[in-house]
Image: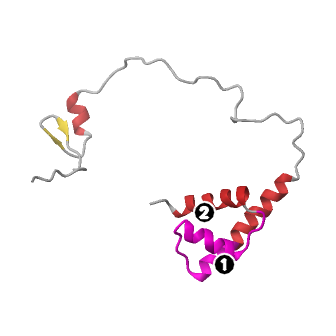
Amino acid sequence: MIPKGLKCLIIIVYILVFMAHFDEKELAKLAKLCRIECSEEEKKKFYSSLLRILDYIDQMKEIDTDGVAPCDRVLETLSNVMREDVVGETLSRETFLSNAPAHVGGMVRVPTIIKMVNG
């Protein structure tokens, strides 16, 4: 299931790319397509928020960006920040297991994630 916030982002991108006009009828259609269930109050609030976002994006379109190089990262001078793997001091098994909430036979006990079904 897609989180509601991500669905909202999908709607905004869809509006920007495919719609010249956006109104409450279009919002209802998109909410149905994205399977977003909202109360009437939530729909009004969501519609109002989307309009403010779209207005802000329209304001950004007015900014003169001629001569501004595209930027795909925040720090242009940043290069590979990976460090070399260096073997360091490790904890003894006893120290390591003393920090674990539960252990069995010298191993850390973790909650069951996948249950096996016989048959």
Residue 95 spot, x, y in % from top left? 24, 32
> Alpha carbon of mark 1 to alpha carbon of mark 2: how far?
14 Å
Image quadrant in which you'd find residue 92 = top left
Residue found at the far left of this picture: 119
Q: Is residue 31 above or below residue 87?
A: below
Is the magenta region chiefly helix, strand or loop? helix
Residue 43 spot, x, y in % from top left? 62, 76
Task: Using the image as rendered, state which of residue 98 and residue 54 is in the foreground.
Answer: 54
Residue found at the far bottom of this picture: 40
> Which residues fall within the magenta stretch?
20-47
Q: Residue at x 89, y 35 (%)?
A: 67
Q: Which residue is mark 1?
A: 44
Name the mark on residue 8: 2
Element type where label 1 sits in the image: helix
**Where the C terminus falls, by quadrant?**
bottom left
Residue 17 spot, x, y in % from top left? 71, 55
The answer to whether residue 53 is visible is yes
Q: Is residue 106 above or below residue 84?
A: below
The answer to whether residue 46 is visible is no
Q: Residues within 10 Å of mark 2 (few under 14, many from 20)?
A: some
Task: Using the image as rendered, state which of residue 88 and residue 116 is in the foreground.
Answer: 116
Image quadrant in which you'd find residue 98 = top left
Task: Using the image as rendered, state which of residue 50 and residue 83 is in the foreground.
Answer: 50
Element type where label 2 sits in the image: helix
Q: Amino acid at mark 1?
A: Lys
